[in-house]
Image (cartoon, rainbow, N blue to C red):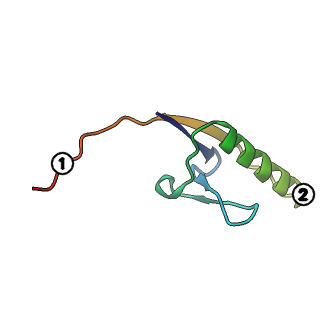
Amino acid sequence: MVVYMLQNDDTGKWYRRGEHVRGHWVDQQQASVWPSPQGPIAARTSVRRLTDRRMQGTPEMVVVEFKLVPTKVAEDD
């Protein structure tokens, strides 16, 4: 299975969806994951639009693809 995340190239932080339009940048373990690239692309567009409206510098962002590999989980005896 392939999943996608959005990373801020400037800080190395990852995007986490918020309750409202704005999200925030967190460590990778807390970041949002999408099953298709459209999710992080839409988030990147929203961040750019919001920062442009506020006349702030737009962060450099990249959509990162990860392939999840199943691992065997030890069963309890």
- Which quadrant: the C terminus? bottom left
Of the pair 62 and 2, the residue shown nearer to us: 2
Does the residue at mark 1 contact the one at mark 2 (Cβ under 8 Å)? no
Type of residue at label 2?
Arg
Report crowding for label 1: few under 14, some 14 to 19, many 20 or more residues within 10 A (C-alpha).
few
Q: Is residue 9 visible?
A: yes
Question: Residue 16 location in percent, x, y?
Answer: 61, 57
* Callout count: 2
Q: How far apart are marks 1 and 2 (CA)?
A: 51 Å
Q: Which residue lies furthest to the bottom in this view?
A: 19
Q: Which residue lies furthest to the left in this view?
A: 77
Q: Residue at x 76, y 61 (%)?
A: 21
Mark 1: secondary structure = loop
- Against 58, residue 41 (above or below) is above
Q: For residue 34, which numbered disc appears in the image? A: none
Q: Residue at x 58, y 37 (%)?
A: 64
Q: Is residue 18 above or below residue 47?
A: below
Percent coordinates x, y for residue 32 in the rendering: 57, 52
Q: Rate crowding at label 2 as few (under 14), some (14 to 19) or many (20 or more) other CA atoms within 10 Å.
A: few
Circle 2 SS class: helix
Say which label, 1 or 2, has the lower sequence index.
Answer: 2
Mark 1, residue position: 74
Which residue is denoted by mark 2 in the rendering?
A: 53
Q: What residue type is labelled 1?
A: Ala
